[in-house]
Amino acid sequence: MNDADVSKQIQQMVKFIRQEAEEKANEISVSAEEEFNIEKLQLVEAEKKKIRQEYERKEKQVEVRKKIEYSMQLNASRLKVLQAQDDLVSSMKEAASKELLHSLLRLKEPAVLLRCRKDDLHLVNSALQSAKEEYAGKVNVHSPEIIVENIHLPPAPSHHDAHGLSCSGGVVLASRDGKIVFENTLDARLDVVFRKKLPEVPSINFVVLYFWHSSLLFISVS
């Protein structure tokens, strides 16, 4: 084999080795790229998972915060309602006590009979003691005896029974013998105002009688 053949054979071997090296390098490059892509995908998925978990955590925190705020607002509203109810009950008791005191001062009797609506019994009973004590202090006498009768004033007006007897609230007090009666109801006060607004008619007399035990009212107006 001459030098030319040897040189040719060497070149072929070099070409073959280079080709194999290039193929091997390509394989390594492809494999490395695939591994990189897989690792990159895993990292991306891991970050996505972290982001989702963080979002869910914050979402839960927001939900918890909303529930806490709602609960606080609800409790505050309930407290306001309870306070308003307490204020209303207190004002109603105070108003009832004043009405009772006014009635007692008008009658000035040591013992009186009292009638009210059945629905107002609890309110009236709660105001009795303070009204009696205040009356005794103003008139400088012993506390009067107040007997709450089992006969009640008519109930509040209702559209279900528009023509029936009704009472808008208040009390009616009478002396023990029933001879002196003081009607301190809203209806009676409105009636007084109404009659004051009527034109005077001298030739007409209105006669109304009130018998305590029969619930018939007679008042003479000239």
Image (cartoon, rainbow, N blue to C red):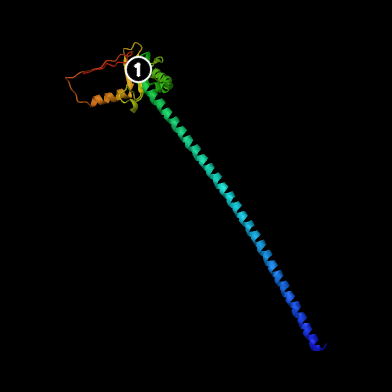
Give the quadrant of residue 81: top left
Quadrant in the picture for the C terminus: top left
Q: Secondary structure at mark 1?
A: strand
What quarter of the picture does the N terminus occupy? bottom right
Q: Which residue occupies the extreme left position in the image? A: 203
Can you give x and y, in whole percent of width and height, for residue 197 in the image? 23, 27
Q: Which residue of the protein is positioned furthest toward the right in this rendering?
A: 1
Q: What amino acid is at disc 1?
A: Leu
Residue 70 visible in the picture: yes
Of the pair 55 and 94, the residue shown nearer to us:
55
Can residue 158 be seen here? Answer: no
Q: Is residue 91 above or below residue 217?
A: below
Give the image location of residue 80, x and y in percent.
Answer: 46, 35
- Residue 49's image quarter? bottom right
Comparing 124 with 65, the one in front is 65
User: x%, y% of residue 47?
Assistant: 62, 57
Q: Residue at x 34, y 19 (%)?
A: 172
Label 1 belongs to which residue?
Answer: 173
Does residue 180 sit above or below 167 in this rendering? Answer: above
